[in-house]
Amino acid sequence: MSDPLFSVRDVVAGYGRAAPVLRGLSVDVAAGSIVCLVGPNGAGKSTVLKVASGLLPPRSGSLVLSGEDVTRLGPQRLLARGVAHVLQGHSVFPEMTVEENVRLGAYTVRDSSLVASRCARVREIFPVVGERWRSPAGLLSGGQQKQVEFARALMLEPAVILLDEPSMGLDPKTTAVVFEQIGRMRSLGLAVLLVEQNARRALELADVGCVLDLGRVHISGPARSLLADPKLAALYLGGTPHPS
Ligand SMILES: Nc1ncnc2c1ncn2[C@@H]1O[C@H](COP(=O)(O)OP(=O)(O)OP(=O)(O)O)[C@@H](O)[C@H]1O
């Protein structure tokens, strides 16, 4: 992989006084690439994203962004420095319009012409967001709402985007559209760290796959190699590899 833009290094993290969920976990993400975390339920995939966005301070280990230690910045400053987190489930405000939801992503930006140009940009990246701009967000389908969340996350022009189960609750056709948009974010140069239950499809999209086990990255490598590994397929991907 080319030099990582963002790294989670040797992180030990957990909740309250309980035993740590992550026990020395490391993962690197390069600009313009997608790294996918897979693993059984409860393995700690969402916890990695919470640490990466600053929501959960690690007990030890570090976060490095563009060569700089950003471990103790906390979620607001990490966001301002370019690390955006799209949480699991739906987070649009249903009574507000799509435009209002998207603009919330830039509430810290005071320059209204800059906000306007970013709105124009995300409407172009996510055409459905542009088409439904004045509709109450609650009227949109699940896949369309997910794209509103992506658009909102891009309003601060992040360098890194953390995506937690973006296909949750979506049918296969809608999932394909959402995955296409994740590919679009990669082509815009973002470093994408993706957690997906739909591990096989996510690995088909990703450049690198990491299998989590016992709070560490158990296996990592080119996503295609993981997909082709029959043992991994049986353990984590629900069956034997598809013939190519
Ligand atoms: N807020 C919390 N407080 C206490 N324990 C938590 C909290 N969030 C997660 N955990 C625990 O941390 C462990 C890892 O959870 P996490 O959500 O990171 O796993 P995951 O791999 O994303 O799983 P899933 O695929 O089920 O979402 C689990 O045992 C879970 O119960």
Image (cartoon, rainbow, N blue to C red):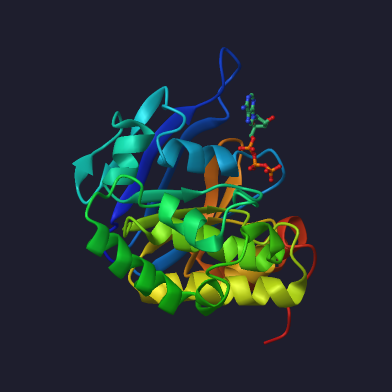
Q: Position of residue 106 (x, y in %)?
A: 35, 52
Q: Nearer the viewer, residue 121 or 188?
A: 121
Q: Position of residue 103 (x, y in %)?
A: 42, 56
Q: Quadrant of the C terminus?
A: bottom right
Q: Nearer the viewer, residue 166 or 208?
A: 166
- Total marks shown come to 0
In the rendered image, is residue 191 in sight? yes
User: At x 43% / y 60%, what residue is drawn?
Assistant: 192
Q: Position of residue 130 (x, y in %)?
A: 50, 75
Q: Nearer the viewer, residue 189 or 129?
A: 129
Q: Nearer the viewer, residue 111 or 12?
A: 111
Identity of the residue furthest to the top in this view:
17
Q: Quadrant of residue 175?
A: bottom right
Q: Quadrant of the N terminus?
A: bottom left
Q: Position of residue 203 (x, y in %)?
A: 59, 68
Ligand 1 lies in which image quarter?
top right
User: At x 41% / y 27%, what residue is drawn?
Assistant: 57
In the rendered image, is residue 229 in sight? no
Left/right placement of residue 65 relative to residue 132 reads: left
User: At x 56% / y 66%, what residue is drawn?
Assistant: 147
Identity of the residue furthest to the bottom in this view:
244
Residue 49 position (above or below residue 202):
above
Left/right placement of residue 198 relative to residue 20 reads: right
Q: Quadrant of residue 70?
A: top left
